[in-house]
Amino acid sequence: MPRRSQTVNQDLYTRGGVITERDPEFVIVRLRLPAGMITPEQIRGLGAIAERHGIGHIHLTTRQTMEFTHVDPAKLEALVDDLEANGTPLGAEREEVVNVTACLGTRNCKFGIIDSVGLAAEIDKRFFGKELPVKVRIAISSCPNGCESERLNEIGITGIQRPIRDPGLCTGCGTCTHYCREKAIGVEDGVVILQQSKCMECGFCIKPCPFNLIRGTDPEYRITVGGHRGRHPKIGRHMIDVKTQEDVIRVVDKIIYWIYRQASTGSLLPEQLEELEFDEFRKTIAAMIEG
Ligand code: SF4
Ligand code: SF4
Ligand code: SF4
């Protein structure tokens, strides 16, 4: 607790986006920036706000957000009001849903399969800041290249697309094979073959066929649960593949409710998966989507 506590807005001081610094007289103020998207106008606004409040540095975080350093807690209220007016409000950091991260996906990346930025905005709108027994990080990669390391988050979402071959007309030219980093697609006896077990479902081999003999399934969303970075990194476990953004929201809603009702504080979500009967929960989710 800072010595100036009599002048500090305690409601703000205890919010998740406000982090006590190494020097406990000061705090770090983290922002809410879903998918790390920010306009030039908002950046100019942040510069002006920093200058107005005497902030010397803004730090870029691993979760695609920014944090104002060395903030006097007595000035929190005015700072948070300014940040809100700038469209870059106070973020989250405690046992709650924190800043949702995403790659640029289909908006800008040639490998994109799903609109990861749009999905991050939707998830942020519905779930950001929800208080839970454990911290929940959500990350989205638009393709299996996994630039967001989404499987190292409590909830990870990956865009996938499966190739469908038409071997009957294949000339065996081999063009498609040069695009597969997994060596999952090849030519045998003059015909294209696919080893399903090696395929990452990245869809990279679909467009290059000069005869359009490889089609792609509709994009899907792969959801993983229980990943974690930090001290003991863990890869999330596969929960389900779904076909629409609406289904992603339904599944994320169920996962968050499950965590809310069943998880306990004091240990990370990945450490609780067995206790929470993850496999049973996964079956419930599959039945919900199929039904
Ligand atoms: S994960 Fe895929 S779509 Fe997203 S930035 Fe990386 S390569 Fe592009
Ligand atoms: S979808 Fe990706 S991993 Fe699968 S065969 Fe095509 S290029 Fe290879
Ligand atoms: S690029 Fe097309 S024609 Fe050539 S091997 Fe692949 S599927 Fe067959």
Image (cartoon, rainbow, N blue to C red):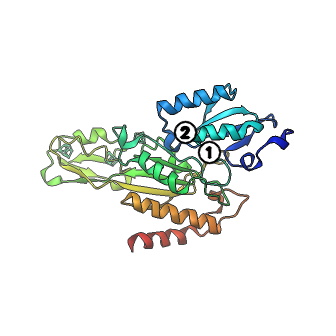
Q: Can residue 135 be seen?
A: yes
Residue 131 location (% of width, % of height) = 65, 58
Is 15 located above or below residue 80 in the figure? Answer: below
Residue 39 location (% of width, % of height) = 47, 34
Quadrant, the C terminus: bottom left
Label 2 Cα neighbours within 10 Å, binned few <14 / some 14-19 / many ≥20: some
Residue 180 location (% of width, % of height) = 32, 42
Residue type of the residue flagged with mark 1? Gly
- Residue designated by label 2: 64
Is 94 located above or below residue 286 in the figure? Answer: above
Position of 185 compared to 72: left or right?
A: left
Looking at the image, which residue is at 76% across and 45% down? 9
Looking at the image, which residue is at 62% across and 45% down? 91
- Residue designated by label 1: 91
Residue type of the residue flagged with mark 2? Gln
Nearer the observer, 145 or 156: 156
